[in-house]
Image (tube, helix red, strand yellow):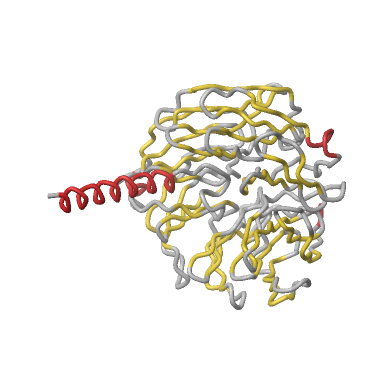
């Protein structure tokens, strides 16, 4: 009897562990999802759901801007700007009802509104404005735990169109693309851990990676990409990458000690070998010229958008990471993408939503829905708990049911 009792206890523990793990991985609690690579772990969704028209669950407006959403449990976080005030929102992810909001003065600026996405870490959420207002809130009530102005406090300068990289949590540190090659703060207190040389950074979000048992951040700066040690900020390597208007905005893609980068204005894309102190160029071409849309890597193939924001000539492309060879291109216009269960979820700037197979053989559309939103959609979609969330620059936020 004792053996049977132990057996059943083990089974119960395994089942509980499964559901706890499933819940943790189904969250989309930061920019580009749980691993920061734009890939959702969800499989219980229906990629054909758009074929009969989008099933709209709710709509809301969160103010002008380009901030994406973060979801933890039943709570959704995002940002917008209204009448010269940035507003941080917490909504119910299933109903769109507001749980709390917090506002502070911030000029809308050119292409008005916030760019960065909230980051949820346990019981707190971090936000960054285009002017450098950095907040740590309690996730449940929106109470300010601490706040900083990184321009005033750490002598860093915003790039031309404002800070756009989202906060990244690594251990006890909060990593930002600020200064020449990054800034790190203690996530609990906001105190400085390290800061790079004073100056202007890039627009991309830092990407954390492992190298020989240590943690590094790939930071796409104003005029170069840098690899820096997370704990100290020590620069391990750099590679110059000059772009017109200093528009290095798409997140780097790090895989097997190699880094893929891309910018527009004729800069093209490149794959770098980052073994050693000096990166080596593996290949470079102009198959993907990314204005600011980040990439997906699946089974050795890169999926991304080649085009300018505001141009109808944007093309979603698939490129072989080993050679840079284009496998296919589909002229859907400028846009952004994420992936789940070997499917691509693509949103173009006109608000048209597409779901396609992630395969290098050809573009293979599964379902689509025109005009799920109007106006300008530069913010990537999010898939979480069988719902796709899309947002436009006016702050219209829509929740679409694609559950099985």
Compared with residue 224, is residue 95 higher up or lower down, i.e. above or below?
A: above
* Residue at the outermost left position: 1
Q: Position of residue 71 (x, y in %)?
A: 49, 38
Q: Which quadrant would residue 241 be assigned to in this image?
A: bottom right
Drawn side of residue 369 relative to residue 272, left or right:
left
The answer to which of 348 and 32 lies nearer the viewer is: 32
Residue at (63% x, 25% y) in the render: 87
Q: Where in the figure is residue 296, as x and y percent of width and height?
A: 54, 60
Instruction: Measuring from the top left, give residue 111's x and y in whole percent.
Output: 72, 37
The one of 83 and 67 positioned closer to us in this rendering: 67
Percent x, y of residue 122:
52, 37
The picture quadrant where one finds residue 69 is top right
Q: Is residue 199 left or right of residue 269?
A: right
In the depicted view, which residue is nearer to us: 344 or 41? Answer: 41
Residue drawn at (81%, 43%), measured in percent from left and top? Answer: 160
How many numbered circles does the render carry? 0
């Amino acid at each position: 009897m004792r053996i049977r009792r132990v057996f059943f206890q083990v089974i119960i523990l395994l089942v509980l562990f499964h559901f706890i793990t499933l819940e943790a991985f189904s969250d989309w609690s930061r920019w580009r999802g749980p691993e920061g690579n734009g890939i959702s772990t969800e499989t219980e969704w229906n990629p054909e759901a758009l074929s009969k028209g989008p099933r709209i669950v709710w709509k809301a407006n969160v103010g002008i801007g380009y901030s994406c959403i973060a979801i933890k449990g039943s709570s959704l976080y995002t940002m917008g700007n209204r009448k010269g005030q940035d507003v941080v929102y917490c909504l119910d992810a299933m109903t769109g009802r507001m749980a709390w909001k917090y506002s502070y003065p911030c000029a809308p600026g050119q292409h008005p509104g916030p760019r960065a996405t909230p980051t949820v870490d346990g019981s707190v959420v971090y936000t960054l404005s285009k002017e450098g207002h950095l907040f740590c809130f309690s996730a449940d009530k929106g109470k300010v735990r601490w706040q900083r102005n990184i321009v005033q406090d750490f002598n860093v300068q915003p790039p031309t169109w404002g800070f756009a990289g989202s906060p990244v949590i690594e251990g006890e540190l909060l990593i930002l693309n600020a200064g020449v090659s990054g800034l790190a703060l203690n996530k609990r207190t906001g105190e400085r851990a390290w800061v790079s040389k004073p100056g202007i950074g890039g627009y991309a979000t830092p990407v954390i990676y492992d190298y020989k048992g240590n943690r590094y951040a790939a930071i796409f700066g104003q005029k170069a990409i840098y690899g820096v040690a997370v704990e100290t900020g020590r620069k391990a390597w750099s590679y110059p990458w000059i772009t017109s208007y200093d528009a290095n905005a798409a997140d780097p893609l790090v895989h097997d000690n190699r880094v893929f980068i891309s910018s527009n204005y004729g800069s093209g894309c490149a794959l770098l070998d980052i073994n050693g102190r000096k990166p080596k160029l593996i290949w470079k071409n102009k198959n993907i010229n990314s204005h600011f849309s980040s990439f997906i890597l699946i089974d050795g193939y890169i999926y991304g958008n080649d085009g300018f924001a505001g141009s109808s000539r944007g093309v979603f492309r698939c490129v072989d990471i080993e050679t840079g060879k284009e496998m296919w291109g589909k002229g859907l216009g400028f846009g952004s993408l994420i992936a789940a269960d070997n499917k691509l979820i693509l949103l173009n700037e006109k608000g048209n939503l597409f779901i396609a197979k992630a395969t290098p053989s050809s573009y293979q559309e599964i379902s689509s829905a025109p005009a799920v939103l109007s106006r300008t959609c530069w913010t990537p979609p999010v898939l979480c708990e069988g719902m796709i969330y899309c947002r436009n620059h006016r702050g219209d936020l829509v929740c679409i049911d694609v559950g099985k």
